[in-house]
Image (cartoon, helix red, strand yellow):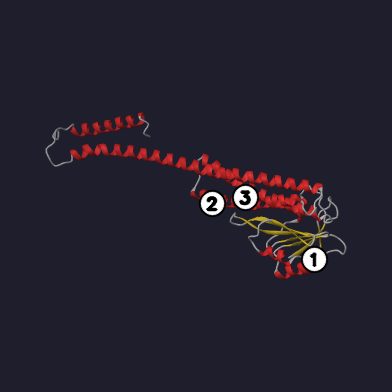
């Protein structure tokens, strides 16, 4: 699906139009593109066919290419699936003098998200529009990481009350997969930003270069955050494993003591249950004495176990 937007001044919102205005700069946003739409854009704006077709590769990593005074910048735009998995697809930004294109085989980036940037974005200055899209993509990764961080924090809080279940640790597999997916994409994005920062084609002015440096700093901060969250996941897993082992040891000690306490009376009850002559078997007080002795013995063993802190 193709959509056309224009923004004449930084203070305005993006305005969606039905078709590009003659002689005016425009942002062409292509999301969930079909092959016919891709070929139409290639023909209309004289784009490099081989580079444009790379957007159909779901594994395409961020990179920058230049061809015929046109910059092709590949990004990866993340989405959160219904199963809480982070899924990212290539987002190709094409920068020409009077037109800016964003192409994706999935959902694209919304103009409202791009408009949140502090950059003075207009469709007349396509380089700044590119930086706005890059900043919005990085912010989207930041939101995904923040969502994951809240999930980790909730699990850590439940650990304090021993309310963590096996499902939480199965969920950690998804959490780690999401963090690793984000780290891979941000690492490649950072490499692409550094190449853009070199400005070998003199396509960026000083203000734009400063904005690129800010984006690179934001990416680095997110990478540090990812490492911290991965460490938190590992710490929670180790802490719960230690708590579980300690709890199991305490329970085994308690069960051992109970087994001993239950077994002691059976020694005497079994002895006096034999069909052979036994001491005091004809005395009326023998039953009470045996029961009293076993109760006293159980109590003494219990006190010894408590003193030794067996349970």
Local crowd size for mark 1, using a 10 Å CA cut-off: few (<14), some (14–19), many (≥20) = few
Of the image marks 3 and 2, the number of the one nearer the N terminus: 2
From the viewer's perspective, is 211 left or right of 292?
right
Local crowd size for mark 2, using a 10 Å CA cut-off: few (<14), some (14–19), many (≥20) = few
> Which numbered circle lies on residue 183?
3
From the viewer's perspective, is 169 left or right of 31?
left
Of the image marks 3 and 1, the number of the one nearer the N terminus: 1
Relative height, residue 163 to residue 86 (above, below): above
User: Residue 252 occupies which quadrant of the picture?
Assistant: top left
Name of the residue lying farthest toward the front = 200
Where residue 84 appears, as percent x and y from the top left, is 59, 54
The quarter in which the N terminus is drawn is bottom right
Where residue 156 appears, as percent x and y from the top left, is 55, 42
For disc 1, the marked residue is 45
Where residue 255 appears, as percent x and y from the top left, is 35, 40
The foreground one among 253 and 27 is 27
The foreground one among 262 and 224 is 224
User: Residue 16 occupies which quadrant of the picture?
Assistant: bottom right
Name of the residue lying farthest toward the right = 23
> Which numbered circle lies on residue 173?
2
Residue at 31%, 40% in the rendered image: 259
């Amino acid at each position: 699906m193709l959509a056309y937007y224009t923004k004449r001044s930084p203070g305005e919102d993006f305005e969606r139009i039905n078709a590009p205005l003659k002689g005016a700069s425009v942002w062409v946003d292509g999301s969930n593109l079909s092959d016919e739409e891709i070929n139409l854009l290639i023909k209309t704006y004289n784009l490099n066919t081989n580079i444009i077709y790379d957007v159909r590769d779901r594994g395409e990593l961020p990179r920058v290419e230049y061809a015929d005074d046109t910059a092709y910048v590949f990004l990866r735009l993340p989405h959160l699936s219904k199963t809480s998995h982070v899924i990212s697809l290539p987002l190709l930004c094409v920068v020409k003098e009077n037109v800016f294109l964003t192409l994706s085989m999935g959902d694209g980036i919304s103009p409202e998200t791009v408009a949140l940037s502090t950059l003075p974005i207009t469709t007349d200055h396509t380089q700044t529009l590119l930086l706005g899209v890059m900043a919005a993509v990085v912010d989207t990764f930041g939101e995904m990481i923040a969502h994951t961080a809240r999930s980790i924090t909730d699990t850590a809080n439940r650990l304090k009350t021993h309310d963590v279940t096996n499902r939480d640790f199965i969920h950690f597999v998804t959490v780690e997969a999401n963090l690793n997916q984000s780290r891979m994409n941000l690492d490649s994005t950072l490499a692409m930003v550094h190449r853009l920062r070199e400005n070998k084609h003199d396509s960026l002015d000083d203000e734009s270069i400063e904005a690129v440096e800010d984006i690179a700093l934001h990416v680095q901060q997110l990478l540090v955050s990812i490492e911290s969250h991965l460490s938190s996941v590992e710490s929670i897993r180790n802490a719960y494993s230690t708590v579980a082992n300690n709890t199991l040891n305490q329970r085994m000690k308690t069960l051992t003591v109970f087994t001993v306490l239950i077994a002691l009376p059976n020694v005497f009850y079994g002895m006096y249950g034999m069909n052979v002559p036994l001491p005091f078997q004809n005395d009326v007080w023998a039953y009470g004495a045996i029961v009293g002795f076993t109760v006293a013995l159980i109590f003494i063993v219990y006190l010894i176990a408590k003193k030794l802190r067996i349970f």
